[in-house]
Image (cartoon, rainbow, N blue to C red):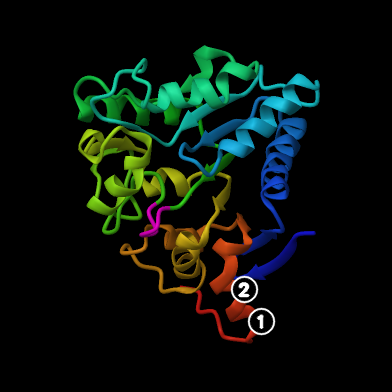
Amino acid sequence: MSTEYRIGNFKVVVADDEAEFDRLAADEVTRLLQQKPEAVLGLPTGSTPVGLYAELRKRYREGRISLRAATSFNLDEYVGLAPEHPQSYHAFMQEHLFGGIDLPKERTFLPEGIGDPQLAAARYEELLAKYGPIDLMILGIGRNGHIGFNEPGTSFKSGVHPAMLTQSTIKANARFFASEDEVPKQAITMGIGNILAARRIMLLAKGASKAQAIRATVCGEMSEQVPASALQSHPDVLLILDREAAALLVADQEAGASCRIG
């Protein structure tokens, strides 16, 4: 059974196990689609949302959800990878979600990894303005607190932009490539300003390696050195965490430690 906390503007839900984690996240998407079939979703990649996407595909097969009227925007894409490259986020989304649901291809948007990054960023910003705002932005979080590919030091007001990846992010993403040298050094990402413009935000985190970033996001000083701390300024943020990712935050709460917001 999950445990809930209210800390500042954050609703924090700690799942007992992975199945519950994925189910809780899918429940949020399901409720939104039931209330607003034409919802605009902001979608992440990486290992954390894979279970969520599997649960959404399952619910579609069972006839419990439909995304045929919805629209999606992915957070980011590597610079230099064509959509058909197996490690591109285009390919990731096709494998883990788009290939198993009824979301129309013409309403699945990702940044273009090939071509001029500045032009690709500008085009993506225009698309967000045309179809947005995003109703539910789903996020993961990096060990250094990055959201999307907004690394420490990124302005909280940033729009879509090409971003240089830090060495720690390259190292963390190397597990998806044959070697660390093959990981692209640059990506096009929604900016923190784009993320904060979403009506609602759901951040997902699994694993002990994310515990420090989660504590800093929720209870630390709001600082561009911890990009996810910008979420302290958003009025509607849900964190779904497994026990390992929540460990430091929960320990603070149980010890009665104060949680500074802002």
What secondary structure predominates along the stretch shown in magenta?
A: loop
Q: Which mark is residue 254?
A: 1
Q: Amino acid at mark 2?
A: Val
Against 32, residue 201 (above or below) is: below
Quarter of the picture containing the N terminus is: bottom right
Side of 213 where 25 appears, left or right: right
Q: How many marks overall?
A: 2
Query: In the rendered image of this protein, does residue 21 appear above or below residue 216?
Result: above
Name the residue at the front extreme.
178
Q: Are marks 1 and 2 in contact (CB under 8 Å)?
A: yes
Residue 228 vs 65, above or below: the answer is: below
Residue 112, by quadrant, is top left
Q: Residue at x 62, y 23 (%)?
A: 70
Q: Where is residue 236 shown, x and y percent of the image? A: 61, 55
Q: Is residue 220 rendered magenta in the image?
A: no
Residue 68 seen in the current view = yes
Report the front residue among 83 and 128.
Answer: 83
Kindly report the distance in space between the C-alpha atoms of the residues bearing marks 1 and 2.
6 Å
Badge 1 amino acid: Glu
Q: Quadrant of residue 50?
A: top right
**Residue that appears at 39% across and 48% down:** 193
- Please say whether residue 143 is one of the residues in the magenta stretch: yes
> In this picture, is 248 found above or below 210?
below
Image quadrant in which you'd find residue 161: top left
102 horizontally vs 205: left or right: right
Q: Secondary structure at mark 1?
A: helix
Horizontal and vertical percent for residue 238? 62, 55
| The label number, if any, that marks residue 250 in the structure image | 2
Question: Which residue corresponds to the image point at 52% horizontal and 36% vertical from the top-left?
Answer: 42
Q: Which residues are magenta?
A: 142-146
Q: Position of residue 101 (x, y in %)?
A: 64, 19
Query: Looking at the image, which residue is at 62% across and 38% down?
Result: 51
